[in-house]
Structures are given as structure tokens and as C-alpha cells.
Image (spheres, helix red, strand yellow):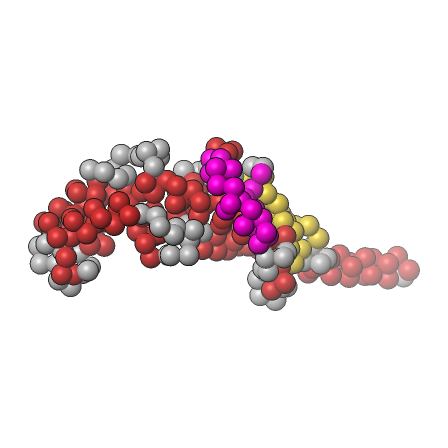
């Protein structure tokens, strides 16, 4: 009987342990990783999404402590992007000083890591770990700052000028055609062709993003794009729709 009692006690402990581990089992960790990446894709300027699309960024979620329902997020960034952002910041000492005074910094190494607590019921990041003073909050803010700078710099630069694809042109034309004043598809084809002569598809996307997000470190940026955009609207018969 003592052995049976011991067996029951042992099974009971194992059962409880398994119940706790279920907070951060493989499925939960995969879900957390997907949510975190989606959060960053929705919030961070589009140069980040392009790096993800190019498979230059990888994220991994692991369990730190199943008992406390804590997770560990590791984000690997391309070294070339870090070097480019560092060079941009070093070229603007005033901005560097201002950002540092406000507690902002861009990543200095390719692998960023943060531990955070997870609510066992909802499997959501606990609120205190979403604040910028937390490890996860600092990670998010530094990546956002870096790709905001890269988005702005690449919007009009000569680098990263990938050739247009048919899908790129169709996507931009579809956005154009959503305007109620567009009477002929040819007007949007004209508009897309005009932009494609000077900008890559990504540069168009970056400029359009910056024009609708004035606080994305884009003050005074995009004047050339805006001028061309206005000219094409008039020449292609789209001015009345915008």
C-alpha cells in the first residue's frame, strides 16, 4: 500500500506538472511567436516587412520557466541593416543625441533577446512587459526605430532598387483603381508606369507609407516623390480623384 500511495502521489505531481507546462507547450510558443511577428509587421515601417519577406529576419520563441509561464523571444536581424542604420545615425549627431536622451537606441548586434511573462489564461503578453521600460518593449522600440530610419533612407536612395514585377504593378494599379473618379484602367496604368520609371516598387511603397505617417521620422522627406506623384496625377487624369 505504501508503494501504491507513493505511486498515486507521484502521478498527481506529474499531472500537475503537465498542466503547468501546457501554458507554454509547443503550440502555445508557436502562437506567441506568430503574434509577436504580426505585431511587429503591423507596427514597424515597411523596410522591416521586406526584410522578413526576404527571409533576412528570423524569430524564435522558447520557454524560460514553465512554472511561471515565462517566454524568451529571440529576434535575429541582418547585420547589413544594422550597419546601415548605425551609419545613418552617426551621420546625424544631433539626432543621435536627441534619441539617446529620450531613451531610444538602434540595435548594436544581430541577435536581440527578451524574456517576458505570459498570462496563462489568454496566452497574451502581460501588460507590464509591453511597456518600453521592459526588455520586450525596448526590443520592439529599437527595431521600430531602426526600420523607420531605413525606410526613410531607402525611400529615395539608389540602393535596394529591385526591378518591378507584374504583380507589383498590378497591386499598385488595383489601389489606384479604388478611386471612384477613375473611369478608365489606362489612367492607373499610366500612373504606375510613370512611378516605375524613377522608383522601385519598394521605394513607392516606402514613400506612400511615409506620406501617410508624418511621425515616422520622415519630416521634410519625400519632396521629389510628392512632386512626381502630383505631376502624374495631372498627366494621367487622376488629379480630380486625389
Which segment is the magenta one? 84-108
Q: Quadrant of the C terminus?
A: bottom left
Nearer to the camera, 169 or 1: 169
The residue drawn where x is 39% and y is 50% is 218
**The furthest residue to the bottom:** 121
Above or below residue 206? Residue 200 is: above
Q: How many marks?
A: 0
Is the N terminus in the top left, top right, bottom left or bottom right quadrant?
Answer: bottom right
Q: Is residue 160 visible?
A: yes
Q: Which residue is painted at 16% across and 61% down in the image?
A: 241
Say whether residue 90 is magenta: yes
Instruction: Answer yes or no: is residue 41 visible.
Output: no
Q: Is residue 226 found left or right of 125 in the rendered image?
A: left
Q: Quadrant of residue 42?
A: bottom left
Residue at 12%, 53% in the rendered image: 234
Front residue of 206 and 15: 206
Q: Is residue 48 left or right of residue 25?
A: left
Position in image of residue 70 (x %, y %):
67, 55
Q: Is residue 28 magenta?
A: no
Give how far across and how far down residue 26 sits, in percent: 59, 50
5 vs 111: above or below: below
Q: x, y percentage for residue 114? A: 63, 49
Q: Main secondary structure of the magenta part?
A: helix
Q: Estimate the x, y position of residue 17 in percent, counting from the top left.
A: 73, 57
Instruction: Residue at 60%, 64% (x, y): give it.
Output: 127
Amino acid at each position: 500500500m505504501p508503494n501504491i500511495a507513493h505511486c498515486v502521489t507521484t502521478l498527481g505531481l506529474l499531472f500537475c506538472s503537465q498542466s503547468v507546462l501546457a501554458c507554454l507547450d509547443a503550440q502555445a510558443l508557436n502562437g506567441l511567436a506568430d503574434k509577436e511577428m504580426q505585431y511587429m509587421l503591423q507596427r514597424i515601417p515597411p523596410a522591416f516587412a521586406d526584410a522578413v519577406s526576404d527571409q533576412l529576419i528570423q524569430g524564435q520563441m522558447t520557454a524560460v520557466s514553465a512554472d511561471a509561464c515565462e517566454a524568451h523571444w529571440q529576434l535575429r536581424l541582418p547585420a547589413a541593416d544594422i550597419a546601415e542604420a548605425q551609419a545613418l545615425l552617426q551621420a546625424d549627431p544631433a539626432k543621435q543625441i536627441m534619441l539617446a536622451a529620450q531613451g531610444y537606441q538602434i540595435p548594436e548586434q544581430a541577435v536581440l533577446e527578451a524574456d517576458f511573462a505570459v498570462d496563462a489564461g489568454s496566452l497574451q503578453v502581460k501588460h507590464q512587459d509591453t511597456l518600453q521600460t521592459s526588455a520586450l518593449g525596448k526590443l520592439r522600440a529599437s527595431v521600430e526605430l531602426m526600420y523607420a530610419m531605413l525606410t526613410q533612407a531607402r525611400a529615395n536612395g539608389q540602393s535596394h532598387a529591385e526591378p518591378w514585377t507584374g504583380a507589383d504593378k498590378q497591386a499598385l494599379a488595383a489601389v489606384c483603381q479604388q478611386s471612384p473618379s477613375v473611369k478608365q484602367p489606362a489612367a492607373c496604368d499610366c500612373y504606375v508606369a510613370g512611378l516605375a520609371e524613377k522608383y522601385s516598387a519598394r521605394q513607392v511603397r516606402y514613400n506612400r507609407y511615409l506620406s501617410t505617417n508624418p511621425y515616422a521620422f520622415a519630416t521634410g522627406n519625400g519632396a521629389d516623390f510628392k512632386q512626381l506623384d502630383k505631376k502624374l496625377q495631372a498627366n494621367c487624369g487622376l488629379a480630380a480623384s486625389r
